Image (cartoon, grey):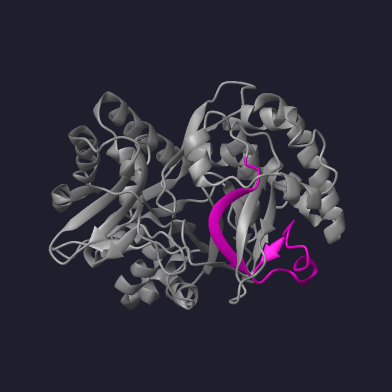
Amino acid sequence: MLLTRFLRESIVNPGITERRKFYAIDRSHDDKLEWQLERFNEIWKRISTYVPFYTKLVRRHKLPRVVRDWDSFIHEFPVITREIVQGQGQQLTSRERRPEWLRVTGGSTAQPIQLAAWHSEDRITEKDMWLARRWYGVKPSDKCFLIWGHSHLLGTGVRGMANRLKRQILDKLLGYYRFSAYDLSREKLRRAARTLMAFRPRYLIGYSVALDLFRQANEDLVDSFNDLGLQLAIGTAESFPNPESPSKLSALLGCHVGMEYGSVETGLIAHTTPGGIYRTFWGTNFIEASEQDSKGRRRVLITSLYPRCFPLIRYDIGDEIEGLEKSETETAYGISQFSRVVGRCNDYVELRDGSRIHSEVFSHCVRDIKEIKGYQVVQMDTKKRIDLVTSVPLTYAIEEKVRSRLAKIHPELTEVEFERVKVLKRTLAGKTRMVIRE
């Protein structure tokens, strides 16, 4: 197993070195924009040839064959939303070669989508991920403990068993230990602490809310954690629930606390540095931000700068950021750093026995059911309900498919009720939360 981990490191290290050299070059903001435009035009030749959605727009002269500058790009290219992806996914998929896997996500906006992908996409973004971890002194051969949602455990039949076995073997070889983040009760999080100490990893990854609850459940173990010699804890998938959460977690674990920013659809977009700011991987994604609102927040659009089976062009990821680099505030595109991701914090459902079920449970249970276009968990005093936006009438078969998966998490979740709705409830700010309370 140790040999496998070091073999992996020897394979990954050249890519990390390549990325480090690329970002070490001193470039002005205009130089970066020029590089990105040249790169996008290279990708655009393939997209406009092989992606039907864009091929039609070019033939109708609604989009150019070559993008002259970023201002014209922003003026001419349409924004792609989750609704467009749900409705026109096939037209937005490249015909250049066959898909090799699917990116399946419920996402923080509670709208399940599926995007076709190639394995080469992960190999490109993996270099950014490991470069960011090297900022904190973490290497590909280091052992990792994950407080994570295990969607592979929800599969059924022979295929489900095969996926679970494959995941267990790979984790063993790579030096990973996965502890379920589905149930965030104090008892489970105390057990997670004991398991982590026995495993003695170099770094820890978890849903940000799960890591914060882990801290609250184990604050009396500060001395034991500090003796472990952890190098890094990474929060991901969502924001921490409170501004002071990272510093409190750092004090408990005796290590740096970093944050990944990205999504299943995009891969890694940015990562915090040990100094606390988010540094974007602008060589992989072109990032736009809207005009800032009264609170200083800007909505984010992502354009991928590498070959993808499902190219992202001005994709509305549904997030807001704040604190841009001064030289980038005027144009607000080609963003290379920012200070904070705003309002991307998921929730949990509390059960009668005190179990706290992370909202990602429900995402993992519905996201690959093509008839479900949106969902929302409603927690009431005595019962739970899942509101569903569906493309067809809600059937018993759809309900049972979701229930059978929920049953693998907790028996009480089989009591959940379902209701078909036309639209999901939104907050005053226009956000769609995965969990609401009545």
In depth, the one of 226 and 144 nearer the eye is 144
What is the quadrant of residue 27 in the picture?
bottom right
In percent of width and height, residue 235 lies at: 48, 61
Residue at the spot 79% in from the left edge and 34% down from the top edge: 42
**Residue 163 in magenta stretch:** no
Q: Nearer the viewer, residue 48 or 102?
A: 48
Locate residue 316, reporting x and y percent. 57, 51
The number of callouts visible is 0
Q: Which of 334 and 299 is in front in this view?
A: 299
Vertical position of residue 231 compared to residue 417: above or below: below
Residue 232 % position (x, y):
52, 63
Magenta-colored span? 312-338
- Position of the C terminus by quadrant: bottom left
Residue 192 in which image quadrant? bottom left
Relative to 111, is 296 above or below?
below
Estimate the x, y position of residue 82 in percent, counting from the top left. Answer: 50, 45
> Height in image: 207 above or below 326?
above
- Tell me: 7 left or right of 427: right
Answer with left or right where residue 44 lies relative to residue 133: right
Q: Which residue is drawn at 32% across and 35% down?
A: 164
- Which of the 4 image quadrants contains residue 338? bottom right
Looking at the picture, tell me which residue is in the foreground, 43 or 224: 43
Give me the residue at 61% from left, 52% from top: 269
- Residue 27 seen from this side: no
